[in-house]
Amino acid sequence: MVEVYVLPREIQEAVANFPEVRSLAIPGLVWGISAISCWQIIALMTLRLIFLTRARDFRESAYKWVLAIVGVLLFYVALVVVATVVLLSMGYSTPALLVPVCFGTLAFIAAIALIVSPATNHARIVGRSSSSSSSPKV
């Protein structure tokens, strides 16, 4: 709903109020849809991890979902960095630019926290030991 209705409407309103930002309308729409999509993908992957945890099936395969979340978080951080650099180079340094920078910083911190988390490392170790113990011994 936000990507299809709210975001395009808000961009049209911003262009109507500030015609000088007309050149940013399409890139802003693409960036907004990409950023929202990142968070939707992360939400779906998190649900998958919750289902695996509830089913007591949190193995090495679940660790791949955590790495995928880290990848999407880092992609989002890259989107924020590119958007910030482009906007600053074009001379658009408004206080509203601080919002995506803050979200990008939080996403980067979350990605690092997932990478170094003891729970993530434990899941990786448990997954390896359970897969090696289930294989037939020669």
Image (spheres, rainbow, N blue to C red):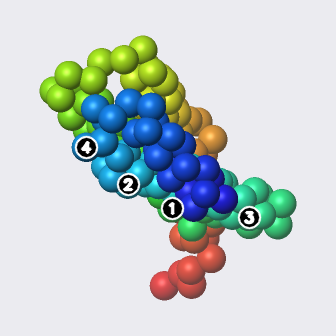
Residue 123, percent from left and from top: 61, 52
**Where is mark 4, residue-wise?**
23
Mark 3 / mark 4, whichever is N-terminal: 4
Amino acid type of the residue tagged 2 in the rendering: Val
Spatial CA span between label 4 and label 2? 13 Å
Amino acid type of the residue tagged 4 in the rendering: Ser
Return the residue found at the far right. 54
| Numbered tag placed on residue 64 in the rendering | 1
Choose mark 3 or mark 4, whichever is in front. 4
Mark 4 / mark 2, whichever is N-terminal: 4
**Where is mark 2, residue-wise?**
30
Left or right of 8, for residue 24? left
Q: Residue at x 57, y 84 (%)?
A: 136
Mark 3 / mark 2, whichever is N-terminal: 2
Q: Residue at x 28, y 32 (%)?
A: 20
Amino acid type of the residue tagged 1 in the rendering: Lys
Left or right of 131, for residue 58? right
Spatial CA span between label 1 and label 3? 12 Å
Residue 131 appears in the picture as rendered: yes
Choose mark 1 or mark 2, whichever is in front. 2
* Secondary structure at numbered mark 3: helix
Name the one closer to the observer, 43 or 112. Answer: 43
| Numbered tag placed on residue 52 in the rendering | 3
